[in-house]
Amino acid sequence: MNEAVKQEILETIERYDKIIVSRHIRPDGDAVGSTKGFVKVLRDTYPAKKILLVDDDFSDYLAFCGGEDTAEEEDYRGALLIVIDTGTRKRISNRNYQKAEKIIKIDHHIEADPYGDINWVEDFRSSACEMIADFFMTFRDRLKLSAEAAGYVYMGMVTDSGRFRFEGVTGETMRLAGALLDLHPDTETLFANLYTEEPSAFTLKTHVYQHLRITEHGVAYVYMDRAAQEALGLTLEAASSVVGELSDIRGSLIWVAFIENTAEDNIRVRLRSRFLGINDLAKRYHGGGHEMAAGATVYSEEEMYALIEDADRLLGAYKSTHEGWL
Ligand code: AMP
């Protein structure tokens, strides 16, 4: 698939002496893993090139992956910028991205903004890391792959696919994950970093279980307002993580977390679903995303309740016309 564009990407990388790699804002495991893994392989393969990993913001929960670089004006001059896992230019976590000479976009979101000079976009992939693993394996004879790089990329595959549970995981996903495991990444340390939690996390879970609401047709939602965030001592990012706590309620095929963002005077919305899509709903509320994992923004509590009502109607319509959902 897309052999020509992968070939073009490798040839472009080989032509440039200065390469900067960036990802999307509010990074997740896929964004961090894909860029970290890609940079590691490029550095090992091309030690004479200057290769920088540059981003404007970070996620505390991925701090175990290590730091990043800073780039000077000079580093952008005549440089190649590779942006991974980032659907639109406004989500690029590098305010200087336009200073690079050429941009390569590597992404698995539905194409909405082909901002690259070269765009390799495969929206059927379960993660951007799956694409990076594919790139590594396609050129395994020309690239220096390592256990460390494989670990980063494996991390993104695991996290973005919900540990290989989400729709979009295919036989090819598993073959590529298997090829990464053949490089012997330290998965025990990886999983300890990803999935053990501080005792305080359990206080948050308790709060969510006490405050979640379920609508008539089964939409589960929780609103983390400013008071709750302050009472629990949460960063916006930590408060946003609560969407994951709502995923396993039988009959709640749509679940939504609302997180008050006082700095921006709006409410961040994280929408998830199974069996039915919610990205059209997200689009109606200043958002978008994947079919079953999307984000939006609302600007008042009234708008929040309007979204909940829309979601409830959507789920009601789905349940009355389908069978076999749980
Ligand atoms: P999140 O809940 O932030 O993890 O978002 C889930 C997915 O929805 C992400 O992978 C993004 O592609 C997308 N997304 C989130 N927020 C927005 C937004 N405001 N506009 C468009 N897409 C978004």
Image: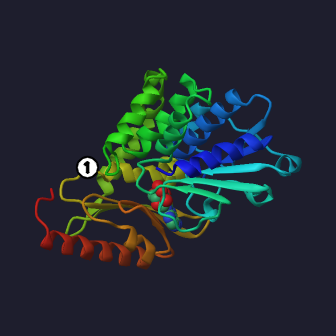
The outermost residue toward the front is 4
Does residue 261 lie above or below 141 as drawn? below
Query: Residue 181 or 166: which is nearer the viewer?
Result: 181
Query: Left or right of 227: which side holds 245?
Result: left
Image coordinates of residue 76 in percent, x first then y, are 82, 50
The C terminus, quarter of image: bottom left
- For the question of whether residue 56 can be seen, the reply is no
Q: Amino acid at mark 1?
A: Asp
Secondary element under disc 1, as helix, strand or loop, is: loop
- Reading the image, the residue beneath label 1 is 248
Residue 41 picture quarter: top right
Which residue is found at the position 23% from the left and 59% from the top? Answer: 252
| Number of residues whose C-alpha sits closer than 10 Å to that of mark 1, classed few (under 14), some (14–19) or many (20 or more) | few
Query: Left or right of 20: which side holds 34?
Result: left
Which residue is found at the position 58% from the left and 70% from the top? Answer: 265
Query: Residue 325 or 106: which is nearer the viewer?
Result: 106
Which residue is found at the position 86% from the left and 51% from the top? Answer: 77
